[in-house]
Amino acid sequence: MDGIHDLGGKDGFGPVPVDTPDFQHDWERRQWALSEIAAAPGGTIDWWRHGIECMAPMAYLSLPYFEKWCLNEMAHYVDQGVFSTDEVLAGHPDAPGEPARSFNAEASLQFARRFNISYAVEMSTGPEFELGDEVRTINTPVSGHTRLPGYARGHTGRVVAYHGGHLFPDAGARGTHEGGHLYTVEFTASELWGEDSPDAVCIDLWEAYLVRA
Amino acid sequence: MASYDSDKIGKLHRHLHTHLPSDPALRVKALESLLVEKGIVAQDSIDAWVELYAEQIGPKRGATVVARSWLDPEFRDRLLEDAGQAIKEFGFEGHATEHLKAVENTREVHNLVVCTLCSCYPFAVLGVSPIWYRSAAYRSRAVKEPRAVLDEFGVTLPEETRVRVWDSTAELRYLVVPERPAGTEDWTEDQLSALVTRNAMIGTERDLKVA
């Protein structure tokens, strides 16, 4: 989606707030917990991410990070029919349920280890490209979710790593479990920004985003 | 069942943002009450999770991994080969680490990690991301003018050092392994790990300070 979230290379945001203290509000810590241990059921990681991309651009740029997560959980719970919009606005369910089983610190620690989810997908065909190949990214507007950033479209880079099949986000955000060959492609800063520079940007890209250069 | 309908989710977002109280603390409280009262999650579990991230899961984990890689060449090889597997030796695996990659700084290369499309971060080894990492300024500029960004963090690179920026657009996550400072040859793992800062493992700090 060619949305406001696609920030790479945009100008005008000023200096990085390097000195902002690491302080987290209590509500931020609690939202992190809610998103981890009580994430809206069903869906896919890419559909979840796409939800945030679909926020109004002004809200996207101005709301704190974990407030966006909060709104996104709410929107997904309503989308999936777990709660109605009215229940969310009231902050209480119409019909309370049985209290959930609680877990303690040690159980949380073990539970946290189980979040190392694999996104690898077995592929029935081999990869099109090899390490060292020159590839060019496609340059097509995308209305749905995609993980090909705007700044990297229509540019030529070199394949520096191959990671096997990974869940393809563009399909995942539409609810389809589909794999695609995943590569890391290195682009020189000169190619991306037209400046003489020794630097480079490495981007993880699926085969569907690439053509042979 | 999720709708997978962009227009519908966008409309819900706008409706909720318009009609909920504007204070984020009240918004999160509303979500928490809904989930607790419905029996989806218990209050104690939320408290335990908050405690877990305050006390146990944070950059100390990443620092331990880095220090071990300096001391144990075989571990270093395993880390560079497959960091997602290597951190399991410590029981550090968790959110966003299954496809973790370690990238080493050298005299020639300085690594810098960003997520331009959202704010992907290896939570289970570095904790919750710092505010600057999620800022629009960092996300927009790290790929385009990494040296100017590094300068704002007080890092000036020698001319012969090239910057490699890693934009984590997929489910891979990156952990920068900084260079081991000189003068630490006989240091223990605990002493070494105390030198490794969170920013160094993202790439916004380079030369670790030996007190």
Image (cartoon, coloured by chain):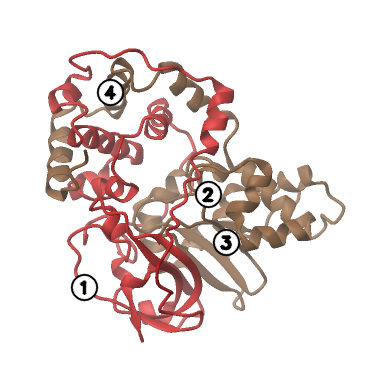
Question: What amino acid is labelled 1 in the image?
Answer: Thr
Q: In this view of the protein, which residue sits in the foreground, A13 or B2?
A: B2
- Marked residue chain, label 1: A
The secondary structure type at the circle numbered 1 is: loop
Alpha-carbon span between mark 1 and mark 2: 31 Å
For mark 4, does the 10 Å Cα neighbourhood hold few (<14), some (14 to 19), or many (20 or more) residues? some
**Picture quarter with the N terminus of chain A:** bottom left
Both labels 1 and 2 in a single chain: no
Q: Circles 3 and 1: CB distance less than 8 Å?
A: no
For mark 2, does the 10 Å Cα neighbourhood hold few (<14), some (14 to 19), or many (20 or more) residues? many
| Residue where numbered disc 2 is placed | B97
Indicate the position of residue B80 as horizontal and vertical percent values.
64, 62
| Residue where numbered disc 3 is placed | B155
Indicate the position of residue B168 as horizontal and vertical percent values.
44, 59
Question: What amino acid is labelled 3 in the image?
Answer: Val
Indicate the position of residue A197 as horizontal and vertical percent values.
47, 80
- Marked residue chain, label 2: B
**Picture quarter with the C terminus of chain A:** bottom left
Alpha-carbon span between mark 3 and mark 2: 27 Å
| Residue where numbered disc 1 is placed | A140
Q: Count of labels shown?
A: 4
Q: Which of the marked residues, 2 or 4, is nearer the chain's N terminus?
A: 4
Q: In this view of the protein, which residue sits in the foreground, A54 or A132?
A: A132
| Residue where numbered disc 4 is placed | B26
For mark 1, does the 10 Å Cα neighbourhood hold few (<14), some (14 to 19), or many (20 or more) residues? few
- Marked residue chain, label 3: B
Both labels 3 and 2 in a single chain: yes
Q: In this view of the protein, which residue sits in the foreground, A196 or B91?
A: B91
Which circle marks residue B73 in the picture? Answer: none
Question: What amino acid is labelled 2 in the image?
Answer: Thr
Question: What amino acid is labelled 4 in the image?
Answer: Leu
